[in-house]
Amino acid sequence: MKIILSLLLAIACTAVLVLGNMHWNDQIKSSVNSSSAAQEEVPQKSVDEKQNPTEDELLSFAGNWPKESQELYKKRLGEKKPFTILFGGSKAMAANVNGWPNAVKGELEKTYGDTVTVKVKQYDLNSMEFVQQDKQQELIDQKADLIIFEPFTLADNGEINNSDTLDNITTIIQNVKAAKKDTTFILQPPHPLYKATFYPQQVNELKNFAKENNITYLDHWTVWPDIHSKELQNFLNKDNESANAKGHEVWALYIEEFLIKK
């Protein structure tokens, strides 16, 4: 009897060990399969996230640009050459102290990658000094395809007759296009000033000049508070003469939304 019980006990122990081992192997196999599936999914997601925009997508982003600039950008894409954008103008741009040009430059590089090169040229001059010193040659040297130009309107305020300012703008554009005929200009005003009187008239004449000469005009004043509203002071430095960080933020956003159509 003892012998029979011992045999039954041995058989039972063996069965338990075999079943336990089978269950353990199944668990390991299931875990390995789950891990492999997860590893296969992660790289796929990573690859998708790193895909560059297609040519059609890039051209769609440039949908607000002047038509000639869109066509030249398409040509540059075909040539595998970068399209060069230049931000130029007076110290109102605050390019050296985190003004709007730096913010817009970063967004353009994120969107267009190496298909676009962005340059900045800022001058502490008025339009007459700029032309007399032949600074337009520096713009020519940049070989820009598109120039977004703030033509010293505020710097000229109280210094240069507005008709002379417009003549100087004409000279600058003609000189640059004579050197590189496919360069396109876009004009924009500097920032608005609280309760200014003559300055808004200058800006309005600049806007009319752009319209008369079929030049795209970026009317970013439309996103600032009204010049007669005290709220505008929140967008200017204490001197009420220059834009503060908040002002450059709204200015940058306007330029970005023009240059990057969503």
Image (cartoon, grey):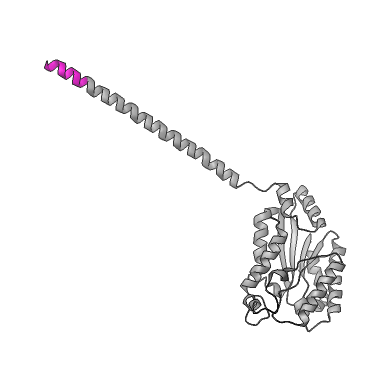
Q: Quadrant of residue 248?
A: bottom right
x, y (%) of residue 59? 74, 51
- Answer whether residue 206 is magenta in the image: no
Span shown in magenta: 1-10
- Answer whether residue 6 is magenta in the image: yes
x, y (%) of residue 262? 68, 55
Q: Is residue 183 left or right of residue 24?
A: right
Looking at the image, which residue is at 78% across and 61% down? 146
Q: Is residue 49 left or right of residue 134?
A: left
x, y (%) of residue 259? 72, 59
Looking at the image, which residue is at 78% across and 82% down? 198
> In this rendering, is residue 90 above or below 15?
below
Instruction: Please name whichever residue, 90 or 79, is drawn nearer the observer in this view of the structure.
Output: 90
x, y (%) of residue 210? 83, 68
Q: How many marks?
A: 0
Looking at the image, which residue is at 74% across and 61% down? 85
